[in-house]
Image (spheres, helix red, strand yellow):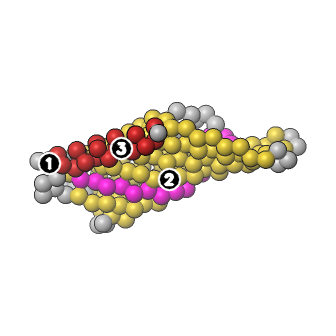
Amino acid sequence: MIKFSSVVLLVIGLSSIYNYSFGQAMRRGSLGLEVGFPTGKGSENTGTGFGGSFRYESAFRNSDNASWLFSVGYISFPATLNIPGLNVSGSASIIPITLGVKYYPDGSFNGFYFGGEMGLATISAKLTIPGFGSTSASENKFMFAPSVGYHFAGFDLTLRYNAITDGNFFGIRGAFTF
C-alpha cells in the first residue's frame, strides 16, 4: 500500500509541475546506459554495476538556464563474499525514482550543466549460499545525487555521486536524447 501511495503522490506532483512549467518551453526525453562504481561501506565485496534509465527534462517557464527533470532507472551490482570453505554470491539492484533540477550557465540548454536529483531508491538484494539456498530482502531509501554533465547534439553525458544510506556509488550516464 505504501508503494501505491508513493506512486499516486508522484503522479500528482509531476502533473502539477507539468502544468506550471510548460508554455513554449524546451523539453526532451533521453534513454541512457548507466555504469556505477560502489564507494564507502561494503564496496569491497561489490562489483561495478550496469543498468539503464529514462529521463524527462523540461525548462521552467520564463527561464533561460534552468530545467526540472524526472528520472527512473535500474542498475544491478554483482556481489561476492569469500569465506573459507564457502563462496557466497549475489546481487544488489537499485531502482531510483527521482526529481531534480539542471542549470546551464550559458543559457542555451546545451553544453555544460550542473544539477541535482533527489527521490526514492528501491534497493533489492539477493544472496545465494551453496548448500543453504537463497535469501532476499528489499527496502526503500532516500536518495540524493549531485551531478555535472554536458549536453550536445542529441547526446547527454552525466557524472554524479549517488548518496544512498549504505549504498553510495559514483555513476556515469551516457544517453541519447529525443
In the displayed structure, 32 sits above or below 19; it is: below
Q: Is residue 5 magenta?
A: no
In the displayed structure, 20 sits above or below 175; it is: above
Q: Which residue is mark 1?
A: 61
Specify the segment rendered in magenta.
43-58
Relative side of 120 to 22, left or right:
right
Q: Which mark is residue 74?
A: 2
Q: Residues within 10 Å of mark 1 (few under 14, many from 20)?
A: some
Q: Residue at x 57, y 48 (%)?
A: 93
> Which mark is first along the chain, 1 or 3?
3
Q: Is residue 48 magenta?
A: yes
Q: Secondary structure at mark 3?
A: helix
> Which mark is first along the chain, 1 or 2?
1
How many discs appear?
A: 3
Relative side of 7 to 78, left or right:
left
Marks 2/1: CA distance?
30 Å
Q: Position of residue 98 (x, y in %)?
A: 38, 44
Marks 2/3: CA distance?
20 Å
Q: Which mark is residue 8?
A: 3
Amino acid residing under circle 2: Tyr
Name of the residue lying farthest toward the front: 1
